[in-house]
Image (cartoon, helix red, strand yellow):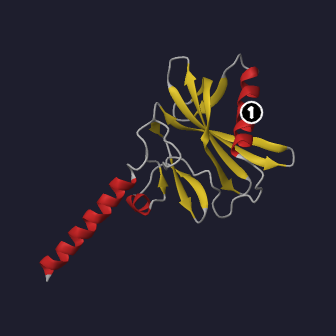
Amino acid sequence: MLSMNKSWIGLLGSVALAAVITGCHRGSSAEHPGPTSTEHPQATPSAGASQRSELEGHELAQAVRAYIDAQASRDNGHFDVYDPLAGKMLRLTLVQVHEDRLAALGRDAYFACADFKSNRGTVYDVDVFMKQTPNGLEATDTAIHKVDGHPRYYWIEERGHWVKRSSVSWWDRLLGRARECE
């Protein structure tokens, strides 16, 4: 009886491991995966997201670009982002805003991913957060998501809302709630 229980536990463990491994390799191998990947929150609003249906991806991308351009025009073409891990301000140059990684986060909050480069060639994936206000879309925060392709945090869907986590559990990966795979 004991050896039969061990067999079932081993089998279930193998299935769980296969699900985790398979789930983490379903996207492309590029630094920024395409629409079928799960690295960033999906563009489709989750439950609790804003009901403002007329906001389209290009409108959000334009608002993010306008915010970045306005900040950069004040500082000789550089976009300054504070890096809390390095404890210093980074002077970055915009490479692109990813129109395939725009998402509604809920409560009239939105997310866009943008790539920047430092003058030393380091690539920074910066998440720009926007909020719908009576005056239009306004930037509320920026966060360094990745440095040279290495993530600092991951996205997890909890009760219909996307939240950032510094790490993810095997359970979140197994259930497909973790959005960090490439």
Q: Is residue 64 above or below residue 20?
A: above
Label 1 neighbour load within 10 Å: few <14, some 14-19, many 20+: some
The residue sitting at 75% across, 47% down in the picture is: 131
* Residue that label 1 marks: 67
Q: Nearer the viewer, residue 16 or 79?
A: 16
The residue sitting at 78% across, 52% down in the picture is: 54
Q: Is residue 34 above or below residue 16?
A: above
Give the x, y percent position of residue 117.
56, 24
Q: Amino acid at mark 1?
A: Tyr
Residue 132 appears left or right of 35? right
Give the x, y percent position of residue 98.
60, 37
Q: Nearer the viewer, residue 15 or 107?
A: 15
One can see residue 140 in this view? no
Give the x, y percent position of residue 104.
67, 52
Q: Is residue 180 above or below residue 32?
A: below
Residue 174 appears left or right of 130? left
The residue sitting at 18% across, 73% down in the picture is: 6
Q: Quadrant of the C terminus?
A: top left
- Secondary element at image label 1: helix
Residue 181 appears left or right of 144? left
